[in-house]
Amino acid sequence: MKSTHTKIESMWWSDKPAPLLLRAASKLYGLVNHLNLSLRQKRCAGSPLPVISIGNLTAGGSGKTPFVIWLTEQLKREGFKPVVVCRGDGGKSAAPQILSHESDPSIVGDEAVLLFKKSGCPVISGRDRIRACHMAAEYGDIMILDDGFQYRQLNRICDIVLIPAEGVGNGSLIPAGPLREPLEALARADLIIRTGEEGGVKPLTAGKEWQWWCSADQLVPMAGTSSEKPLRAVALTAIARPQRFIQSLEGLNIELTETFLFPDHHPFSAADIEHASALNLPVIVTAKDAVKLEAIWPAKCELWVLEQQPHSEPGLFEAIKEMVT
């Protein structure tokens, strides 16, 4: 039986129109959101560091976190010292704080911890991103603002918007569809990047759209004693639009006996772990899930993490670099 959040996401990404009540609510959301973003723009502040904003137009599942990790690697190769600032979704902290190896994902957010571990860069997490950007000046020379497209309170030198290769779902605003803003908002973007391996996607704008994607790389053991890649397993994840994760595992010829899908940023409990491991089969999660499970997963239960390999259309980073130098 599908959970509520899975049913909603299925509706958003189908060709069928949403129920009338949700479409009416979308009109109200659009009006309130437009006023809110306009007020944010009036309060726009400068930053002590040049800012690259990475954002999206749809709710969740556009690949922002792996893209930010990839971008930090490219910047470091060019001699930059990037600092990542994020809101800390899934965490409780409002005041910005610099992450360390002891940072708790329930406090600073699961994506923030993943960014810290994978990028090797300073990461600052917290709701107050104006304060965070001033902190960032102590740690580097360029700032990456994660999930920044709707954060209009901060000036940026480059606005990058990620859109899934599948498009924008049914094209409706929240809650009838996945759009956080109307498509016209893409006019604010400096670069539009389609994320996903699907080729021949229909452009959303008249300008150049770049392609960037991740492919399933390998399964890495995290707990348990087996070192052989499982052929049968259980999938456990709490990410937005988990279909790509499931498809990646199937593409690796892994038979999934059961799938446990939770809302994005869901805090895993002992009961969740017990249910996932009840079949006595290996459990496979994403890297984002792993940062929350690392401290609480039973050592005797087999747990694997799906690692991904990023791929970029030639010239993409050069186009970004041209805007920041």
Image (spheres, rainbow, N blue to C red):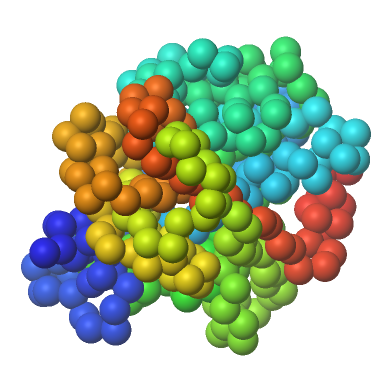
Above-or-below relation of 312 to 235: below
Quarter holding the C terminus is: top right
Quarter holding the N terminus is: bottom left
Q: Measured from the top left, where is residue 240 in percent x and y?
A: 37, 54
The residue closer to the viewer here, 93 or 292, is: 292
Seen at 63% across and 15% down, the residue is: 135
Q: How many marks?
A: 0
Q: Name the image quarter holding residue 137.
A: top right
- Horizontal side, residue 158 vs residue 227: left or right: right
Seen at 74% across and 27% down, the residue is: 49
Query: Does residue 49 appear in this view?
Result: yes
The residue closer to the viewer here, 37 or 70, is: 70
Q: Measured from the top left, where is residue 123 in percent x and y?
A: 61, 25
Q: Measured from the top left, where is residue 36 in percent x and y?
A: 35, 43
The residue closer to the viewer here, 88 or 254, is: 254
Seen at 18% across and 74% down, the residue is: 18
- Horizontal side, residue 298 vs residue 222: left or right: left
Seen at 47% across and 37% down, the residue is: 225
Query: Does residue 39 appear in this view?
Result: no
Q: Measured from the top left, where is residue 228 in percent x and y?
A: 53, 51
- Horizontal side, residue 161 vs residue 185: left or right: right
Above-or-below relation of 203 to 217: below
